[in-house]
Amino acid sequence: MLAEPRLPRRALFRAAGLLVASTAPLAVPAGQGQAELPYPARVQVFVANSGSDNVTAYDTRLGQSRIVPAVGETPVGVAVNNFGDRVYVTNEAANTLSVIDARSLTVVDTIPVGSNPFGVASRPVVNRAYVADFGSDTLSVIDTSTHTLMTAIPVGMFPHTPVVGHGGICVYVTNNGSKSVTVIDTRTNTVVNTIPAGLYPSGIDLNPSTGLGYVANTGDDSVTVIDTYTAAALGTIPVGQAPLGVAMAPSGLVYVANQMSDTVSVIDTKTHFVVATIPVGDQPEGVAAMPDGSYVLVTNNASNTMSMIDPATNTVVNTVPVGSNPEGIAITY
């Protein structure tokens, strides 16, 4: 028996289970100051502050922050579109998705979605965003050209985090209450597969080079490796206590925020071993990797900070104040 970990408020169920292969795989192709900041290259990092109902926009080059105040109640998830001009923020207690103009840092629209929306992902090129509705067991599909809800797809219990893969053909959604990942074909908005995961699967990210995905299991202190081509769970990697956020870095390393260990585990995707453990702030949650490889950024929920990790040394090189109880994080240029 695994020892009972301290779990985040959204991890509601405990169950025992084994990893098994899924069937009917989807065929996919291989393969702190306040300042006016220039657009688009300067405002790069967006952090959802669930305790202060706002979003921090941080410029990593100038080391300056601005606040977007007019989002909904309890913002938790954040994503940026492919062009870097729109930021999407889920408001968990308001059941809405805020749309932020990255130039003016103002909310330009608010879209009703499902109950207790958590994670959000943007689909490259195509005008779509996907919202995991934690309280209604659905994935809301948003037309980002019209800011309208297109459909809500039933998924597993307590969907937590979506990620888009395979050039936009698939969306993978972790189901916090079902020990699984739902696979959705974005061309038909239908569920095509379910992949087993561990206890309370939360964060997820994909390696586009290998087709492997990495799922943080908050309830059993592990990361499940999934094969997105065969829709199978390949095994698990032990990490820190209560892992939440996951980010794939350009270096080929995977960074996992361990909420109750106050650390980040670094996984080598060639060996699938943890090669470093990095102390960060109190209760890290969200993780994002800079596309140019310069930093890995981690939100620290109980410290109201963001840690900036140098991936060359896997050490924290800066700690930035943000809003209250930061959770989701996204990066743009």
Image: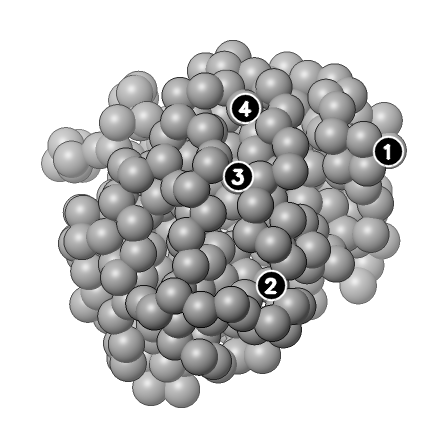
Q: Nearer the viewer, residue 86 or 132?
A: 86
Residue 133 visible within the image: no
**Vertical side of 64 occupied by 84: above or below:** above
Q: Quadrant of residue 192?
A: top right
**Mark 4 near mark 3, Cβ–Cβ under 8 Å?**
no
Kind of residue indicated by mark 2: Thr
- Element at badge 2? loop
- Where residue 88 appears, as percent x and y from the top left, is 59, 41
The local crowd at label 4, few if under 14, some if 14 to 19, many if 20 or more residues have their Cα within 10 Å, is: many
Q: Which mark is residue 96?
A: 4
Q: Which mark is residue 187?
A: 1
Q: Which mark is residue 128?
A: none
226 left or right of 253 in image:
right
**Mark 2 near mark 1, Cβ–Cβ under 8 Å?**
no
Q: Earlier in the sequence, mark 1 or mark 3?
A: 3
Spatial CA span between label 2 and label 1: 26 Å
